């Protein structure tokens, strides 16, 4: 991991992006209490600043826009795993993703990082947003597209992600229960 800024230096967008890039796929797609704790310790106050719209100016360039995607879409899934706050900033992440894509910021970052502009759509429980996410992921790596299609197909089938029901206080239908019990995607 990159060294963290000193306590007197405010976190900058490039700090968030560098941390995430350095973590790489080995940390992005697996559960690790140690990684989650480090991520939370380093960037929790920055997440809250982004969530309260104090960092909106970051959307003006590609690095800043990517940092917002990480802070609003990825960070909560790690730092608040197993709680409703995992999904609390999803609408804001989707808003910034739309703006970033319209500005071409997604095309200005390294290909491996581009997917993080599109994941807010993949994490949505709206079929229209899911379809947009799949379309955006199509030019990327096949495995990235496969996961986008998997997410979309769950929304097509259930209209929501069943694995979120417990933390969001929703009733699970029999079909959703059977899906989860049979090894269906659990987040």
Image: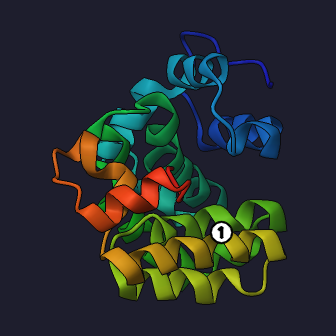
| x 39%, y 76%: residue | 155
Residue at position x 68%, y 67% from top? Answer: 115
Asked if 37 appears above or below 73 in the picture, the reply is: above
Q: How is the image coloured?
A: rainbow
In this figure, which residue is indicated by the disc labeled 1? 147
How many labels sit on residues? Answer: 1
- Residue 141 appears left or right of 33: right
Residue 70 in view (yes/no): yes
Q: Is residue 77 above or below residue 80?
A: below
Q: Residue at x 60, y 19 (%)?
A: 33
Q: Is residue 134 left or right of residue 181?
A: right
User: Toward which corner of the image does residue 167 lie, by quadrant?
Assistant: top left
Looking at the image, is 179 positioned above or below residue 171?
below
Give residue 48's position: percent from left, percent from top.
Answer: 34, 34
Report x, y in % for residue 141: 83, 74
Is residue 13 or residue 130 the one in the foreground? Answer: 130
Q: Is 16 on the left or on the right of 99, as rendered? A: right
Task: For label 1, count other residues whose C-alpha is less than 10 Å away and answer few (under 14), some (14-19) or many (20+).
Answer: some
Is residue 52 something that shows in the picture?
no
Which percent across, then down, holds residue 12? Answer: 59, 36
- Image quadrant holding the N terminus, namely top right
- Left/right of residue 171 with respect to residue 115 in the rendered view: left
Instruction: Write down the quadrant of residue 22 in the picture.
Output: top right
User: For this rendering, which residue is in front, 3 or 23?
Assistant: 23
**Secondary structure found at label 1:** helix
């Amino acid at each position: 991991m990159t060294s963290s800024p000193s306590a007197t230096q405010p976190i900058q967008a490039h700090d968030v992006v560098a941390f995430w890039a350095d973590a790489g796929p080995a940390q992005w797609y697996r559960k690790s209490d140690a990684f989650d704790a480090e991520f939370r310790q380093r960037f929790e106050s920055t997440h809250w600043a982004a969530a309260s719209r104090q960092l909106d100016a970051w959307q003006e360039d590609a690095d800043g826009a990517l940092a917002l995607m990480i802070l609003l879409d990825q960070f909560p899934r790690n730092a608040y795993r197993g709680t409703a706050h995992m999904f609390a900033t999803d609408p804001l992440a989707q808003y910034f993703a739309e703006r970033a894509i319209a500005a071409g910021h997604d095309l200005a970052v390294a290909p491996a990082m581009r997917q993080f502009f599109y994941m807010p759509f993949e994490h949505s429980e709206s079929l229209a947003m899911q379809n947009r996410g799949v379309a955006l992921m199509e030019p990327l790596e096949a495995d990235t597209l496969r996961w986008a299609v998997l997410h979309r197909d769950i929304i097509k089938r259930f209209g929501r992600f069943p694995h979120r029901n417990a933390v969001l206080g929703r009733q699970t239908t029999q079909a959703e229960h059977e899906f989860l019990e049979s090894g269906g995607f659990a987040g």
